[in-house]
């Protein structure tokens, strides 16, 4: 059937493309005439009728597609009947899903019995599907985006890989046999890993597919006419698979296959066993191979085995620490690309040129390599998904992602149009005017309307400029930022006049200056102990550890040291800061990713100097646990400790990323979390951003959150092994809710934790005396709870690479060290009622539930209230409290010579912290029977406020105790951060001490004033 005149509308096309489209229409008419004649002979529907029946909108879309794409025109001239088929299958409007594709390919391969026929069927299938993909990309049905095009090409590649592999396995089985099963009996198949954009599911229209072939285990084939070693079998099979897709025939190709990303590239074996791949990446894997493996995904063959392989390689790809060394590798890769671009005059290449596709990919993959080990949300192959996570993780501002994502989409859309012209893998802008018009037309969609080539180029230039700016912000050399520091303001010019150039610090570090020059430079930079600073720098440079460093590690140290010396000079006390930071540098010489972290983040280096200069305790913590350096990267959280709810959420998220059965990793994560959160508190303390009370609150919150999580871990561990214990009322505890309490005493109970405080704990349970657990390996309740307590202590005190969580003191439990480790609440109550000493009731004043079952916690509070609220004989109580306090002063207070020298033990001497604590405890035991408000609190500050509110202390007396206690504790905190110990100068505290002593005598030793 002849097409009507003016079949293809021309009015919406540029005049320069109308003549071209008329020529293509003529070719299509001729092809349809021949196709209709052939259909008539074969008694089939003539394709010309389907063309003639196309709606106006379809014709307009067809005109657009044919005007832009020679590939589409050539396919439709060769196969005019395909248009009707695509239309009937709705493939012009929506991409078929994977199951539909697999079904179509299975039909296409039905009856194929030779490799030649396989090649032909695969190529026809691919060309038909790609025609639909090009149509949708250029015609843009509603809702269609670049991502849909990329996903469609990726699905097509996976379908063709799997279809070809399955056919080849069956076709070759009679001759070659099939691989022997794995040791566990599961069948073996080839594992095909998709790399690059195939692994990401984001292929471009005419992309190569990067593959790696692997197989699980060695062995020999079975069931064929001859046996093959698995290595030879899978190599031959891989070669056949490549030829099925890559070999050019009269029908073209399916996908070009690139195998160069495999271990050792073209010089290595085509296929590797899992063991060989694991050994290679562990021993020889290079940085660029980590970059490549970010995208690895099983795409054909044994997908489950492929996922197991990639899981085993995950530690190679994603480091547990923040790996800023990856940026150096990315810089080197980009520098190589830039040199090649300049050499070949490829600046206009929209993939490799400045501000191109590759720079967006580098930005995203830099964060994946650096942080993917810690932020597991980034362990995805899709660039789109990874980019979306960056604002959530506060790695890039949302505004930056809102620019990068549409600019990347624009470049990928442009890439697709360039490749749709002639089904060629190209990212180079055309020079011919007619091709430029075709590209401008192809890019006019989704709100973009480019009247001509210059308009398209203007938009492209703006997009590339934005991408280049964001790329430089992430990948640029830190030294460039230092050298380009602004000097246009008076302050900037003054700082520049004082500042020693980095080149001079580099010369000093390398020992290129003579002693006089080096001393003069250090003196001008503000170092007061010039000789000591010079000696320490030289000692580091000449140390055996530095001399024995590998090349990459030494290069990182050599790049960092000028920046470090410069940062030290900028600190308030350069000599002190340098002295405290150098032990940290020595500690990480074998973990050079931390050297890269400091080099790549000058702000982090500045925070490091400030914190170490202010506190040797912080410097020591960082040297002991270098993983805490990561915290310096986010000042917003470094100086703003989290409240309890946020702490619990952050710890939950951190542990969610770790399998529950990986106890070692979970313990390590707990310790890193605790150390990091304490560092936040100390940093805010030094910055003056938190009051003393808040500092103790935050340190206590950290302990409570950790204890709650440790209790949950220990409880689930015991329940999995032994089942749930029986409660005292005969019911069963549940797997999710421990029938258990952790009671905090001392500073933990009193919400007064300091840096390095241990935890005074008592464990209580709700188990039936004669009960047992209900699991496959039941045990008595008493054994269950004893093991639970032991496991909690183990989890808290076990030493891992990140140290221990807390030191634990259990001596305040009933009967002390002679008593049971874990006690039932009923037994605890009986002990407190009938056996406990007065000092144990004093300790109970500071006791409160810090983790465990809420209902059981209410019962504990009732027992505590009953015991403390009992009426006591005032004289007897006073006598026992005073005797205990005198005994403590005698054994724990400062020595006589220290007191004579005007020294004062803040905690134990008369008039110190413990006197105030004993006063409060005495008041609760003596008065709470008539003043129940005193039973509400376990901390001294609110007890003092309550005594004032109930008029047992005057306003002046309460203020004196309040001020003295705060002064003592604040000084204790400061001394802990300064690593100071022993008595302090008494004079600054004399007035506080006198006030406390006066109140002590009035309340507890009135006879002393007689």
Image (cartoon, rainbow, N blue to C red):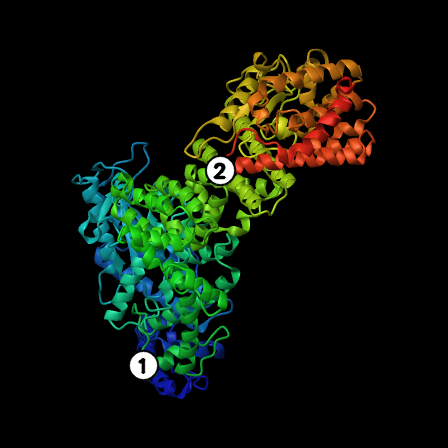
Point out residue 596 in the picture as x, y percentages from the top left corner.
36, 50
Specify whether 993 is left or right of 5: right
Distance CA(mark 1)–CA(mark 2) = 82 Å
Q: Nearer the viewer, residue 342 or 890?
A: 890
Point out residue 868 in the picture as x, y percentages from the top left corner.
75, 21
Q: Is residue 626 above or below residue 80?
A: above
Q: Residue at x 32, y 41 (%)?
A: 590
Point out residue 751 in the picture as x, y percentages from the top left corner.
64, 33
Q: Residue at x 66, y 19 (%)?
A: 885
Q: Nearer the viewer, residue 439 or 998?
A: 998
Q: Nearer the viewer, residue 132 or 809?
A: 809
Quadrant for the C terminus in the image? top right
Q: Secondary structure at mark 2?
A: helix
- Give the label on residue 617, or none: 2
- Give the label on residue 27, or none: 1
Q: Is residue 318 above or below residue 961?
A: below
Q: Quick check: can you spot residue 105? A: no
Label 1 neighbour load within 10 Å: few <14, some 14-19, many 20+: some
Q: Residue at x 30, y 64 (%)?
A: 124
Residue ranking furthest to the left: 226
Label 2 neighbour load within 10 Å: few <14, some 14-19, many 20+: many
Q: Quick check: can you spot residue 483? A: yes
Q: Is residue 512 above or below residue 16?
A: above
Specify whether 129 is left or right of 649: left
Q: Nearer the viewer, residue 658 or 305?
A: 658
Badge nearest the viewer, 1 or 2: 2
Which mark is first along the chain, 2 or 1? 1
Q: Secondary structure at mark 1?
A: helix
Quadrant for the N terminus in the image? bottom left
Point out residue 29 in the picture as x, y percentages from the top left corner.
34, 81
Q: Quadrant of residue 620?
A: top left
């Amino acid at each position: 059937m002849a097409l009507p005149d003016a079949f293809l509308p021309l009015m919406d096309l540029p005049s320069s493309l109308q003549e071209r489209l008329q020529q293509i229409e003529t070719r299509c008419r001729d092809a349809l005439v021949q196709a209709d004649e052939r259909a008539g002979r074969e008694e089939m529907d003539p394709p010309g009728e389907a063309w003639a029946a196309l709606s106006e909108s379809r014709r307009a879309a067809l005109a657009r597609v044919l005007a832009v794409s020679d590939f589409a025109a050539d396919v439709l001239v060769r196969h005019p009947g395909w248009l009707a088929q695509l239309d009937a299958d709705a493939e012009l409007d929506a991409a078929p899903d994977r199951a539909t594709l697999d079904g179509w390919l299975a039909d296409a391969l039905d009856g194929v019995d030779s490799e030649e026929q396989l090649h032909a069927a695969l190529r026809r299938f691919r060309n038909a599907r790609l025609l639909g993909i090009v149509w949708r990309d250029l015609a843009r049905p509603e809702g269609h985006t670049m991502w849909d095009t990329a996903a469609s090409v990726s699905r097509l590649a996976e379908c063709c890989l799997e279809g070809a592999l399955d056919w080849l396995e069956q076709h070759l089985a009679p001759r070659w046999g099939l691989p022997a099963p794995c040791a566990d009996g599961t069948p073996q198949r080839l594992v095909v890993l998709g790399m690059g954009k195939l692994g990401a599911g984001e292929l471009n229209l005419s992309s190569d597919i990067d593959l790696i072939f692997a197989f699980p285990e060695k062995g020999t084939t079975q069931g064929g006419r001859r046996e093959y070693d698995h290595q030879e079998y899978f190599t031959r099979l891989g070669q056949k698979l490549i030829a099925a897709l890559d070999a050019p025939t009269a029908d073209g190709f399916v996908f070009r296959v690139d195998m160069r990303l495999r271990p050792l590239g073209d010089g290595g074996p085509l296929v590797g066993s899992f063991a060989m791949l694991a050994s290679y990446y562990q021993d020889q894997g290079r940085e660029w191979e980590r970059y490549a493996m970010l995208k690895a995904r099983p795409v054909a063959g044994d997908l489950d085995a492929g996922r197991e392989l990639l899981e085993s390689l995950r530690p190679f790809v994603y480091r547990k620490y923040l790996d800023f060394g990856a940026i150096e590798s990315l810089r080197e890769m980009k520098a190589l690309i830039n040199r090649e671009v300049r050499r070949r005059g490829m600046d206009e290449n929209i993939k490799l040129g400045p501000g191109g596709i590759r720079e967006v990919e580098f930005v995203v993959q830099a964060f994946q390599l650096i942080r993917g080990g810690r932020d597991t949300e980034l362990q995805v192959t899709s660039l789109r998904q990874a980019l979306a996570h960056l604002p959530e993780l506060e790695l890039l501002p949302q505004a930056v992602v809102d620019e990068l994502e549409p600019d990347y989409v624009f470049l990928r859309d442009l890439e697709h149009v360039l490749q749709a012209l002639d089904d060629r893998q190209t990212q180079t802008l055309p020079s011919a005017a007619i091709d430029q018009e075709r590209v401008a037309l192809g890019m006019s969609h989704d709100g973009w309307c480019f009247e001509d080539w210059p308009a398209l180029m203007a938009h492209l230039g703006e997009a590339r400029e934005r991408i280049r700016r964001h790329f430089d912000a992430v990948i640029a050399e830190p030294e460039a930022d230092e050298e380009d520091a602004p000097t246009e303001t008076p302050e900037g010019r003054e700082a520049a006049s004082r500042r020693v150039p980095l080149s001079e610090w580099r010369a000093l570090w390398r020992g290129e200056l003579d002693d006089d020059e080096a001393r003069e430079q250090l003196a001008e930079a503000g170092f007061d102990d010039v000789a000591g600073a010079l000696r320490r720098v030289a000692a580091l440079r000449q140390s055996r550890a530095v001399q024995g460093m590998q090349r990459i590690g030494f290069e990182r140290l050599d790049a960092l040291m000028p920046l470090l010396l410069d940062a030290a000079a900028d600190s308030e006390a350069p000599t002190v800061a340098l002295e405290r930071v150098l032990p940290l540098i020595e500690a990480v010489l074998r973990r050079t990713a931390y050297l890269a972290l400091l080099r790549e983040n000058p702000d982090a280096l500045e925070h490091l100097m400030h914190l170490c200069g202010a506190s040797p305790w912080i410097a020591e913590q960082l040297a002991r646990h270098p993983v805490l350096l990561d915290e310096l990267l986010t000042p917003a959280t470094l100086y703003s400790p989290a409240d309890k709810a946020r702490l619990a959420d952050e710890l939950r998220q951190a542990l969610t990323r770790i399998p529950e059965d990986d106890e070692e990793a979970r313990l390590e994560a707990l310790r890193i979390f605790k150390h990091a959160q304490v560092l936040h508190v100390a940093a805010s303390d030094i910055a003056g951003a938190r009051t003393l009370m808040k500092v103790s609150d935050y340190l206590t919150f950290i302990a409570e959150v950790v204890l709650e999580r440790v209790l949950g871990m220990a409880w689930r561990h015991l329940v999995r092994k032994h089942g749930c214990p029986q409660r005292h009322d005969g019911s069963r505890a549940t797997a999710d809710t421990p029938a258990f309490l952790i009671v905090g005493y001392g500073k933990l109970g009193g919400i007064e934790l300091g840096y390095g405080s241990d935890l005074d704990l008592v464990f209580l349970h709700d188990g039936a005396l004669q009960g047992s657990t209900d699991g496959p390996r039941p045990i008595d309740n008493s054994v269950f709870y004893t093991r639970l307590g032991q496991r909690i202590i183990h989890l808290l005190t076990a030493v891992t690479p990140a140290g221990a969580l807390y030191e634990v003191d259990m001596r305040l439990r009933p009967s002390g060290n002679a008593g049971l480790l874990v006690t039932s609440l009923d037994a605890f109550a009986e002990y407190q009622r009938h056996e406990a000493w007065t000092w144990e009731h004093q300790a109970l004043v500071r006791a409160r539930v810090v983790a465990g079952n809420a209902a059981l916690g209410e019962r504990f509070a009732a027992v505590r209230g009953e015991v403390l609220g009992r009426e006591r004989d005032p004289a007897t109580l006073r006598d026992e409290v005073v005797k205990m306090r005198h005994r403590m002063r005698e054994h724990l207070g400062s020595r006589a010579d220290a007191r004579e020298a005007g020294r004062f033990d803040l905690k134990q001497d008369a008039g110190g912290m413990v006197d105030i604590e004993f006063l409060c405890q005495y008041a609760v035991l003596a008065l709470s029977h008539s003043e129940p408000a005193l039973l509400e609190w376990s901390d001294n500050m609110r007890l003092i406020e309550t005594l004032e509110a109930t008029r047992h202390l005057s306003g002046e007396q309460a203020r004196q105790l309040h001020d003295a206690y705060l002064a003592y504790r604040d000084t204790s905190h400061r001394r802990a951060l300064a690593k100071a110990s022993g008595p302090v100068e008494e004079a600054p505290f004399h007035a506080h001490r006198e006030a406390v002593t006066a109140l002590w005598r009035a309340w507890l030793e009135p006879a002393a004033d007689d």
